[in-house]
Amino acid sequence: MPNAGGTIPKQYVSYKEYAYYALGYNLKEYKCLSTLWGKESAWNPKAIGNLTGTHRVYGIPQGRSEWLKDQDGYTQIQWGLKYIGNRYGEPCIALDHWRKYNWH
C-alpha cells in the first residue's frame, strides 16, 4: 500500500482506510472501531453530538474537546485512537464499554 516515499498521502484514502492503517491493519480492532465510530458519528468529521446533554461532543470520535470541531477527519482519527489507547487500551474494549453505558 505505501508509495515510493513509504506513506500514502492522506487525501487519497478514506477515513476508514486511514484508521485501519493507523491500527496496523488489525482487522479485529478495526471492526470494533468501525462499529463504535459508525454509531457515534457515522464517520462524519462535522458531527456534533449530545445536543441535549451537559456538554457537546465533536467529530468522528465524538470527543469532548472543542478543538476537534476545527480539525480534519484524519487529525480527529489520530486524536480518537490516542484517547481510546490511553483510556481503554484498544477499540474492542471501548466498544464493550459503549454497549454497556452508551458512551466511551
Image (tube, grey):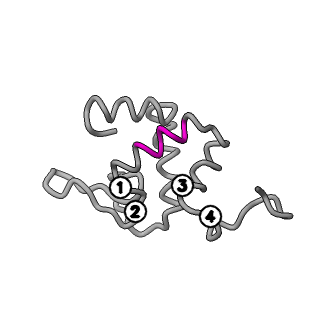
The vertical placement of 52 against 97, above or below, is: below
Which residue is labeled 4 in the image? 13
Which residue is labeled 3 in the image? 16
Q: Residue at x 36, y 51 (%)?
A: 63
Which residue is labeled 2 in the image? 44
Query: Which residues are the magenta region?
Result: 29-35
- Badge 1 marks a residue whose secondary structure is helix
Instruction: Determine the CA span between mark 4 and mark 2.
Output: 15 Å
- Badge 2 marks a residue whose secondary structure is loop
Q: Amino acid at mark 3?
A: Lys
Q: Earlier in the sequence, mark 4 or mark 2?
A: 4
Q: Which mark is residue 85?
A: none
Which residue is labeled 1 in the image? 41
Instruction: Determine the CA span between mark 1 and mark 3.
Output: 12 Å
Q: Residue furthest right?
A: 4
The vertical placement of 61 against 72, above or below, is: above
Q: Amino acid at mark 4?
A: Val
Tell me whether the residue at label 4 lies in contact with that at label 1, contact meaning CB atoms closer than 8 angstroms: no
Q: Amino acid at mark 1?
A: Ser
Instruction: Determine the CA span between mark 2 and mark 3.
Output: 11 Å
Q: Earlier in the sequence, mark 2 or mark 3?
A: 3
Q: Residue at x 47, y 49 (%)?
A: 80
Q: Amino acid at mark 2?
A: Asn
- Badge 3 marks a residue whose secondary structure is helix
Instruction: Determine the CA span between mark 1 and mark 2.
Output: 5 Å
Q: Residue at x 25, y 56 (%)?
A: 56
